[in-house]
Structure formats: C-alpha cells, structure tokens
Amino acid sequence: MNKEPIFKPTFGEYISNREALENEIAFLQTQGDPETAVRSQFYGSDILQEMLNRKSVVGIRFSFGLNENNVPNLILAPLDTYGNVIETEGDGGGLGGGNESKGGNGPTCPTVCE
C-alpha cells in the first residue's frame, strides 16, 4: 500500500508586512499584558539549515509548547513528505548529538528583542 504524500516543500506563502503586523497585534491581544507576553522566538540559521539538510526533509513543523517555566516555546521538527519526523543521522552532525532530532529553546522576546 502506497501512502500519499501529505507535506510539500512549497507549503506556506509570503504575506505582506501589514498582514504580519495585524496577525501579531491580534495574537498579543489574546495574551494578557503586552509588555510581558512572549511575542517571538528566534532560531539561528545553523539549526534550521542542519534540519533542512537531512535526507528527505521537505520542511519544518513548528509546534506550540510551554517549557518547564511555563514560557511559550516553539518546537521544531523536520518532516518528510509523509509527516514523519526525520531523526539525526549518526551523532547529529555535531548540533543535536545523540537522538535530539527536534529543536527548541530559542531566545524569546521580551527577553531578547529587536
């Protein structure tokens, strides 16, 4: 039985700066105090590129989570076209090591902001 592909590298689209700002404002309005609410999280190109370079990866899924301090934390998972998480090969290429195949814990704003 052949499984149909679910995810494609073409998924997602560019949006205007205005639409992005409207989305950000709408989100912040649901988060209580806008001065203390987590507005964003940063991930560097090293971890993103390492995940995208894994064999058969077509994209990265970003899941919402909370860390041990109840701070919002985006979880990054590299997926193949069928939605399977692609594990690191060998030692993770020096970034993830062992079986740390997902990403998380990027710095958040309001701690680190633009």
Image: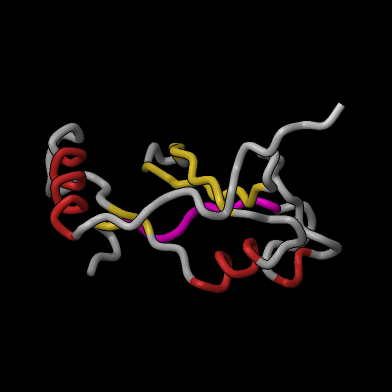
Closer-to-camera residue (44/52): 52
Q: Which residue is drawn at 58% across and 66% down?
A: 47
Among the 4 quarters of the image, the one containing residue 92: bottom right
Q: Residue at x 43, y 50 (%)?
A: 12
Left or right: 33, with 2 as reference point:
left
Q: Percent x, y for residue 46? A: 56, 73
Instruction: Tell me: residue 55, above or below residue 77.
Output: below
Q: Is residue 103 magenta?
A: yes
Closer-to-camera residue (9/33): 9
Q: Percent x, y for residue 79? A: 65, 47
Q: Which residue is drawn at 18% across and 60% down?
A: 17
Left or right: 26, with 84 as reference point:
left
| Magenta span of residues | 101-108
Left or right: 20, with 81 as reference point:
left
Q: Percent x, y for residue 14? A: 33, 57
Instruction: Tell me: residue 17, above or below residue 45.
Output: above
Q: Which colour scheme is used?
A: secondary structure
Instruction: Tell me: residue 4, above or below residue 111.
Output: above
Q: Percent x, y for residue 23? A: 20, 44
> Looking at the magenta stretch, what is its main secondary structure?
loop
Among the 4 quarters of the image, the one containing residue 84: top right
